[in-house]
Every structure is written in C-alpha cells, then in structure tokens.
Amino acid sequence: MKRLVACLLVAVMILSLAACNGAEEQAPGDSSSEANGYDAFAQAMTDMRDAGTEYVNKGLDFQAQSMYAFSGASLSSMRYAVEYILWLKGEGESIEEVCEGSRYIGWNEIAAICYASPYPYYFEGLLYQIQGENENAKPCYVAALMNPAYPEEGVDFYYLKNMEVADLYTLREELRELEKSVYELYTPRLVQIERDEYCFYPEYLRAKSAELLESEDNAGAFAFAQAALLNDSFDELNYRNAVLCAIAAEDLWAAAEYLDAGLLLFPEDEGLKQLYTLFEELGGAD
C-alpha cells in the first residue's frame, strides 16, 4: 500500500506540473474544447445518463440509479468548481450566493450522490491547487487517482482558473442544464457516510457496514450498505448485505426492494433465498 501511495504521489506531482505549465485560457465550445477535456467529460456523463434510461426501459432500476448517480455527482462536481472559481474571482458576497439556484453544493453533499465518482475529489483538489494550497490538493488528487473510474488518460481542468468571468457563467449554465437532464430522471438518495479515499470500493463499504453491525450501529451499517449497492448494482454480495442491514435497521420496505431487485438478477443465489425466508418469517413488509 505504501508503494502504491508513493507512486500515486509521483503521478500527482506530474499532473500538477503539467496543469500549471499547460494552462491556457479556453472556453467550452471553441476549437480547443476536445483538447481541454470538457467535451469528452460532458459526452461521457451524457452517455451514462442515457445508459441509465436504457436500464429503466429494461426494468433494472438499481442499475439505472447507479448510472444516473455517477453522472449527476460528476456534473455537479464540475459545476460547483466553476462556481467556486467565480467566487474566487470576486463574484458574489459568499459562495452560497454564487451557488444560488444550484441543486447541490459542498463536497460532502455532492460526493454523497455517488461515492463511486472520482470527480468530487478531483475538483476539490483542483480548487486547492488553484489557490496555491498544494499540500491540501495532494490527498484529494491521490483519492481521485486511486479510483478505477478515473480516466486512464487523466483530466486537466486547470485552465478554468484563467477563463473570463462571462465564459465561466456560460459554462456554469451548460453544466446546470446537463445536471437538470439527469436530475429530472432521478432524485438522489443522499446517503451520508464518512467520506474517505476508499468509498468507491464496495468491498470496503461492506466491511464498514459489518463493523457497524457488530457495534449495533444498525443505521450506520445500513448507510454503508446502501452506498455499496449504489456503487455496484451487479454484485449479489451487495444485495445480500443491503437486505441484511435494512432488516437490522428495521426498514423492511427497503429490504423488500433489495430482495426483489437482487432475486431478479440472481434468482438462484442461496444467500438471497435464505434472506427471503428470514424476511418472510419477520412478516415481510406488511
């Protein structure tokens, strides 16, 4: 693990130097937009939104929620970063004033939409870097780089610092429209858990929920179980864990929902079938 962290820190330093040396004033929609990554980012999030709709049409609601949540959290991260840069440039009396009309603000709230997205940590690190707080930026960049969803080719949005205020407002409005296209389809369940660099990893989240079950913090265990399922809705272990934690938290409606979804995908899974029996013995969701 220490070796991995050391390698990631080196990568962060390379990323930081490249960003500082290559920063130019650019606006989305111009001839350089593919080079600066905005077009690719926006397209990727639009594709995830559309994939969510395809899952809805197939009756796979949890898979749809995963796609919508990842897209929404990522878009909200960039929009909030743009608003923060506007504030740093002197716009508004407070960051809250600049963000007026936006759906989600603050890194913990945005990350809670989908802990699988690396972009809350990436843009948080970017803002630290823009302000010259490189020591604070490093752990955020490391957390983003550790996430397997972080693009292999990397991203570089440092150019946002040099954009004109009017162009930043234009970009903010574009991002708000993209967010709207996601959140009109899906209202996030903001599950607040302790945010750290491993929250993208379902196995880690399941382990945390198990620890909390042992300490009889059933509500906390259920929160971690929900986050794990949202991060990966194609793993039967996440369904088992979510059902168990929902029962422990006495949320039988949620348990029934997870059982139905899990058994739809994994009808022969012995763990889910045993939990179904237990659920029935508890009286189901009546």
Image: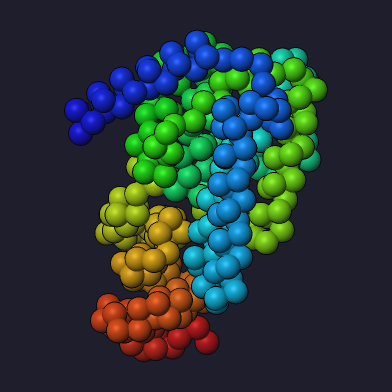
Colouring: rainbow
Query: What residue do we see at 44% from left, 88% from top?
Result: 283
Q: Tell me: residue 168, above or below residue 69.
A: above
Query: What residue do we see at 39% from left, 37% from top?
Result: 152
Question: Is any part of residue 239 visible from this angle?
Answer: yes
Task: Determine the residue located farthest toward the front in the rendered image.
Answer: 31
Question: Is any part of residue 275 visible from this angle?
Answer: no
Residue 147, quarter of picture: top left
> Looking at the image, how many numbered discs can be counted on the residues?
0
Give how far across and how far down residue 35 sits, in percent. Answer: 57, 28
Query: What residue do we see at 31% from left, 60% from top?
Result: 213
Give how far across and how far down residue 5 sits, in percent. Answer: 26, 28
For residue 272, side relative to residue 79 (left or right): left
Give how far across and how far down residue 75 sits, in percent. Answer: 61, 42
For residue 248, side relative to residue 128 (left or right): left
* Of 153 and 207, the residue lying toward us: 153
Looking at the rendered image, the quarter that the N terminus falls into is top left
Q: Tell me: residue 51, above or below residue 140.
A: below
* Of 131 and 8, the residue lying toward us: 8
Query: What residue do we see at 44% from left, 32% from top?
Result: 154
Residue 43, quarter of picture: top right
Residue 162, quarter of picture: top right
* Of 2 and 14, the residue lying toward us: 14
Give how far across and how far down residue 30 sits, in percent. Answer: 71, 28
